[in-house]
Image (tube, rainbow, N blue to C red):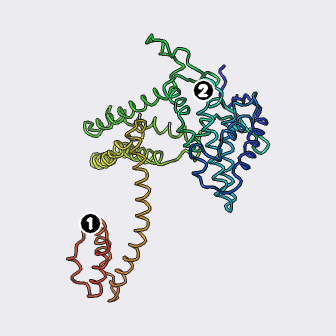
Amino acid sequence: MLPTSREHPQSSPIPPKEVTKIALRLKYQIEHVVPCELEESLVTKPHSTIITPAVIQTAKEAGGEQYRSCIVYCLLVVERWFKRQALKELWDAELHEVRAVAAEMIAKRIIEAEEDLAYLFQEVLLKRYSVIVNGEESAPTNAVEKAVDLHALRVIGSSSFQICVQHIWKGNIIKDDDDRFVEYNQKANTYYWSHFDPDRLRVPLYQNAVQIGMSFLYLVIYTGTLNLSGGLDAWEVLLDLFTLGFICDELRRFWKVGRFYFNFWNIFNCTLYSLLTIAFVLRLIAFAHNHHDSAKYDELAKNFLAFSAPMFWMRLLLYLDTFRFFGAMLVVLKVLMKESIYFFALLAVVLLGFLQSFIGLDLADNELEDTGFIIQSMLNSIMQSPEFDGFDNFAVSRRRCTLFFFNTY
């Protein structure tokens, strides 16, 4: 029987106690290299007087010749320690942040200085190591996974690191049955069919192509359901089966990762699947009622399907972000949406003040008559479509306050 990662976890090739000792040595070294608060540019600039060749050489020798392969991993562990220390010791937060940057820069320089790419990929970046945390061994991880978790952009952006990621992406480096990264021995074979290997089914490039293909097929089925289907026919059955499969996939990932799995796209997908589930339930309710009520529920289900159309097309962006253009635009869009949320949150506070002012003016005659009109007029002004005709019946003070509001926005 093949071992599973849950029952037979992969062990660290270097004893976790030794890895922890090396990390502590590196932490001690960085604390002496950066003894006080410094400008970050002094650490990150080329030919830095802080991160000198002697400092890098000393870091390389922290594990000796026997354990030198885990140095980069230990530096990333040290970076994580400094970042956590910065959160706990706010009075020295800037000092710990600079030290974390120093650990990241040393790791980057070591990666870029290694000329043996096979050793760099197999031993330094892709071999999994463990450390001792609260007296227990941590789950084995490699330097690539640790850098991505820490969002260590300087390490990720180094040329050798990117080459390693490209090899994994294209399938030149694959996982074996023991969940270890190994070189694919047929990558130089020019025979086409030799590359149809079951060991390469998990290659990210192929997985991404399948996901994009399934997403376009899902969109085609939705289009057929919305524009060609007249009821619960083959189009809608396929749509419901695909939706059920995607829901099960989301639940499976949530079961494995937990609450940290949720992000914008997960919530977006869950909202889309909820709308489709409501449409499916309404379709079932329509079958259980008479002809008159059936038509009403069928129309309501169709409305929910039509309402989901923009979300179906926006969903494609999740799988197209591997292309450079869409990825860059998604980063810009994410920042834009984040700033827009801040703006509208501040705008809501100001609007509540004006709304209270208008309602107070409307209550001047002890009658609340125009609340709906006031809210509608304020929303029209935000949407750049103000109307002044309805305020002719207001008192002079109310008209002045209204004109001040419209001039403000």
SS of the residue under disc 1? loop
Q: Residue at x 69, y 56 (%)?
A: 36
Q: Position of residue 378 (x, y in %)?
A: 31, 71
The crowd level at tag 1 (other Cα within 10 Å; few <14, some 14-19, many 20+) is: few
Q: Position of residue 345 (x, y in %)?
A: 43, 65
Q: Position of residue 285 (x, y in %)?
A: 37, 45
Farthest residue, direction top: 191
User: Which residue matches tag 2?
Assistant: 115
Check disc 1 and give the amino acid type.
Gln
Quarter of the figure with the C terminus: bottom left
**Distance from label 2 to label 1 (Cα)?**
61 Å
Q: Is residue 287 visible?
A: no
Q: Relative to residue 240, is residue 119 depicted above or below? A: above
Q: Relative to residue 198, is residue 242 depicted above or below? A: below
Q: Earlier in the sequence, mark 2 or mark 1?
A: 2
Q: Residue at x 35, y 88 (%)?
A: 366
Q: Quadrant of residue 52?
A: top right
Q: Is residue 125 visible?
A: yes
Residue 384's disc number: 1
Check disc 2 and give the amino acid type.
Glu
Between 64 and 217, the one nearer to me in the picture:
64
Quarter of the figure with the N terminus: top right
Between 103 and 306, the one nearer to me in the picture:
103
Q: Quadrant of residue 253?
A: top right
The crowd level at tag 2 (other Cα within 10 Å; few <14, some 14-19, many 20+) is: few
Between 92 and 257, the one nearer to me in the picture:
92
